[in-house]
Image: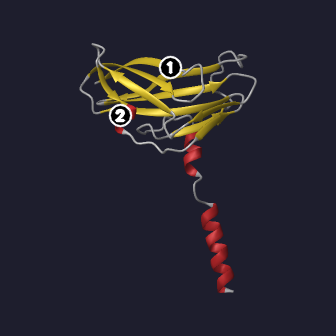
Amino acid sequence: MKKWLLILSFTLLLGGCGTTEKNEADKGEPVMGDGNKQEQHKDKPGRDHSGGIVAGAIEAKLSVMEQNTGSTLLRYELKNQTEQIKTFEFTSGKKFDYIVKDESGKKVYQYSHDHMFTQSLSKITLKQGETFTQDIMIKNLPAGTYTIEIWLTAKNEENDYRQKKTFEIQ
């Protein structure tokens, strides 16, 4: 009898784990992070649908989500606007890279220079209307105006979905 109660308790405990993070992401609120947060989601009702599905296009977008004193949160998104499933294949755990430059155009930071990545094949599959989202927290830079350039590092792709955005650190 005790054995069955223990098994039942353990099963219920495991079943309740891991449900809050997805619910927070569904609210559309920015997720704070240093570039390690990745999500895929289908568009929810109420989201901005500018034009619907465009045959043959993956829509890349980079936007400033939040600016605070000493930091800026940016969001890189790839939306599958095609009528087919799109799969991006990677030769390592590095799915994207970015460079931050100061006002004079001098490189002050590159994401891949101080990160290590798993050496294993991986992929991202986006169904029609799905979006890959990557949040990027820029901090520890002196106050000023900067430009970020971000791109996807998928192999065998003609387009790297490169985006640029100017932002300020206050």
Q: In front: 61, or 8?
A: 61
Q: Amino acid at mark 1?
A: Arg
Label 1: few (<14), some (14–19) or many (≥20) C-alpha neighbours in 10 Å: some
Q: Is residue 66 left or right of residue 105?
A: right
Q: Amino acid at mark 2?
A: His
Q: Which mark is residue 113?
A: 2
Estimate the x, y position of residue 26 in percent, counting from the top left. Answer: 60, 39
Q: Secondary structure at mark 2?
A: helix
Residue reaching furthest to the right: 83
User: Image point 35% across, 34% down: which residue?
Assistant: 113
Location of the N terminus by quadrant is: bottom right
Q: Which mark is residue 107?
A: none
Q: Is residue 98 left or right of residue 153?
A: left
Estimate the x, y position of residue 45 in percent, counting from the top left. Answer: 69, 30
User: Image point 47% across, 33% down: which residue?
Assistant: 135
Instruction: Report the residue marked by disc 1.
Output: 162
Location of the C terminus by quadrant is: top left
Q: In front: 134, or 95?
A: 95
